[in-house]
Amino acid sequence: MQIVDIDFCVPEDLKSLVAIEEACFNDPWSELLIEYDLNNPGNAIYMKAIMKRTIVGYGVLGLLDETSHLMNLAVMPEFRRHGAALQLMAAFGELSRSNGCKRMRLEVRSSNITARRFYASMGFVYSSRLKSYYSDGEDALLLVSRLPIKIK
């Protein structure tokens, strides 16, 4: 695993985050949504993974009472399997616990076997199926984990 720097995103990161979205997803979050979130702290917590002064990935977390919600996690394809996503998850786990959360939840495409295995390796388990969750009609699986999450 390569050590990456993890930090909070700032509005100046917008273009990098949009580029990551477009490289990682068929239906990326819009630039307007990301820009709004970055300029209105508190709605969502954005954190970035930095390698050699380049933002290679990012994630978004919401805090809801005793449960945090991982809303997005993306790493540029050429930087995957180097530990950036794992280190972002570790940071989100610590942030969740420090804010009194006892669990973390997330949605993942039912067809995304790689992501499902990644989350399962940290202790996330199936909770329910969300029918036609994504804009293309694909179902999502709701996964949950007790905190702390297991980082290996």
Image (spheres, rainbow, N blue to C red):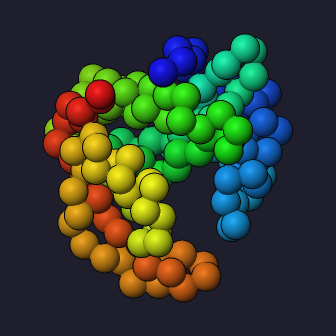
Please say whether residue 113 is visible from this viewpoint. yes
Instruction: Please state if 95 lies on the left or on the right of 19 as rendered.
Output: left
Residue at 75% over, 22% down = 54
Residue at 43% over, 32% down = 86
Instruction: Please state if 16 lies on the left or on the right of 109 as rendered.
Output: right
Residue 75 in the image: state x and y as whole percent: 61, 40
Above/below status of 151 relative to 31: above
Above/below status of 33 relative to 112: above
Instruction: Please state if 16 lies on the left or on the right of 70 as rendered.
Output: right
Residue 64 in the image: state x and y as whole percent: 31, 47
Instruction: Please state if 90 lies on the left or on the right of 32 as rendered.
Output: left
Front residue of 76 and 58? 76
Residue at 52% over, 50% down = 72
Front residue of 39 and 15? 15
Residue 14 in the image: state x and y as whole percent: 77, 37
Residue at 75% over, 30% down = 13
Total marks in image: 0
Please say whether residue 36 is visible from this viewpoint. no
Residue 38 in the image: state x and y as whole percent: 66, 37
Q: Quadrant of the C terminus?
A: top left
